Amino acid sequence: MMEVAHHYVVVGQDYINGLCEGKPAWEIVVKTATATIVIYYLKDFLWQDVSLFERGKRTFFRLARKIPAVRDKIKEEISKIELDMTKEMNENINNGDYIISLPQTGMSNEQILAETAKYTAYGKYNWKMGSSSGTVYNCNSALTDLMTKVYGMSAWTNPLHPDVFPGVRKMEAEVIKMVCTMFNGGPEACGTMTSGGTESIILACKAYRDWAINVRGIKRPEMVVPSTVHAAFDKGAALLNMNIKHVPVDPVTMKVDVAAMKRMISRRTCMIVGSAPQFPHGVIDDIEAIGALGEKYGIPVHVDACLGGFLIPFMEDAGYKLPLFDFRAAGVTSISCDTHKYGYAPKGSSVIMYKEPSWRRHQFFVTPNWPGGIYATATIAGSRSGAIVAACWASMVYHGRHGYVTYTKKILQTAKKIEESCNKIQGIFVLGKPDVSVVALGSEDFNIYQIADEMTQRGWNLNALQFPSCIHIAVTTLHTEEGVAERFCNDLQEIVAKFFKDPPKDGGGSAAIYGMAQSIPDRSLVNEIAWCYLDSVYSTEKSQEEEESSEHKLNGDVKINGKP
Ligand SMILES: *Cc1c(COP(=O)(O)O)cnc(C)c1O
């Protein structure tokens, strides 16, 4: 064996010597160095996060947009879209005036309350009657009263100073531990409260990134996630300078393809993820199989239970069987769970849990050298609202296990009712087999976004999803009220029946925007349209037609409408 190897080494040496024979030393050195640089450059050029084909496409579109005619046309179309968006924002506030500088003297309490009543009454959707998918998870008046009282009592507290506000510290620690217990975390289970699901997810990404860099010595850590995972993971990857690989899902069940996930794991993988359930179609990934992958390769596993976090732990008591989804599943090292969704706490709270404190350590941020003191925070925020913590704590102890089980039963019953009725409507179908509270609908006969537009006409505010085209409703306590689910299904049935009789023409509305957005090959244009939308959210400009006729003064000393 050794002799054979030795023979090849000698042959190799002779070959290379032969190549160099008679060449000056400088030539050998320069050519070798050049070749090394070229290979290094090629490797970098060919193997990037974005495929060569994709980069080629982007360059093509970037160049195409330099052509004046193309550039002007795009600019014109986009400014039209921008105007439309601002116009709609203004219509939703009855084209009222904007306050754009501080009132010279303060308003009276009566005036403020009257204005607040006006502001909070704007909007075309009757969300209190359950017209919106998700959005508001509970608005029962007894709970609202309690929340506002608790908020008032704790309004000025700040968990950044546990020495000054020890009671709020206790509440926060209790919220986290109660949620850990819900998910069968052992005595070591721990976590932090955050401002919402997005922050919980970003922090889990940060913890695993820092673990990978500092413990494993991975240069650019990579996460492997289902394609249906929440966009917060993409946001986390972008903010934290991580790679993200999206694993395809089974087109029938909509669950992540675990075999494909296994193939996409590499030396750089620092975390793998499953959702329980995922947002688009309400389906729970196979957490036990994903956990087993994590165990096998020594990679931490995050379960995103942001949406279903206050439903799935109660489903067994409510009479529904589920495979393991929490810390009982081997390999699961962290779970995100939103208290501000089905926990019925006011918006602004979520919990990120870890199986043991060593993972949480990597989430913390400490800078020992700040002149302001040794600065140590557990989450992204510095100062935070203790009132949000207190209200969350109050909601949890108010409902108790029994309260949550009762709501879970009602929500599951309503979701099943919607699923069954929709499955009977010819012309639409339910995607996957909804496991919890979300029912996603597609159509082979019609443009599903046109159906959604008709539903909007009838007062419904549903979520539009893409790849594949579908819409969904996330059932909340508001939809469990008498007659709401029936009205939803009847409206759908009537719209589809109408479409069969009188097929819809291609028109405007969200159908046009979503249809177009999915088919635009130049994805940077979609970004640009989305930027316009975000700009319009912060607009204090009145729409142009309104401008001439409008009254420019609200009261004597308030400056309005963009031009101080
Ligand atoms: C809502 C949600 C999140 C986080 O969203 P936030 O709006 O930041 O609370 C994450 N994952 C899933 C599946 C969700 O539904």
Image: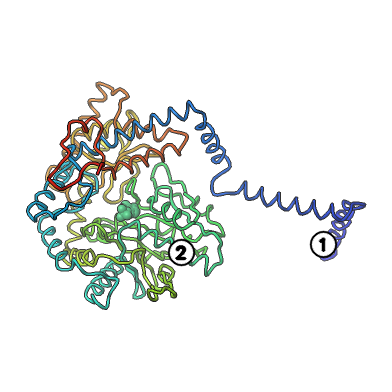
**Residue that lies at the very extreme toward the right in this rendered image:** 22
**Residue that lies at the very extreme toward the top in this rendered image:** 502
Helix, strand or loop at label 2? It is helix
Q: Is residue 98 left or right of residue 235?
A: left
- Is the residue marked 2 within 8 Å of ligand 1, measured from its CB? no
Q: Which residue is mark 2?
A: 208
User: Type of residue at label 1?
Assistant: Ala
In the image, residue 432 above or below residue 503: below
The answer to whether one can see residue 315 in this image is no
Pick whichever, 526 or 503, lies toward us.
526
Pick whichever, 407 or 216, lies toward us.
216
Residue 402, image quadrant: bottom left
Residue 11: x %, y % from top left: 87, 57
Is the C-beta separation of discs 1 and 2 under 8 Å?
Answer: no
Residue 356: x %, y % from top left: 39, 72
Q: Residues within 10 Å of mark 1 (few under 14, many from 20)?
A: few
Q: Which residue is mark 1?
A: 5
Q: Is residue 555 left or right of residue 439?
A: left
The answer to whether one can see residue 314 in this image is yes
In the image, residue 407 above or below residue 373: above
Dividing the image into 4 quarters, which one contains the C terminus?
Answer: top left
The residue shown at (22%, 34%) is: 455
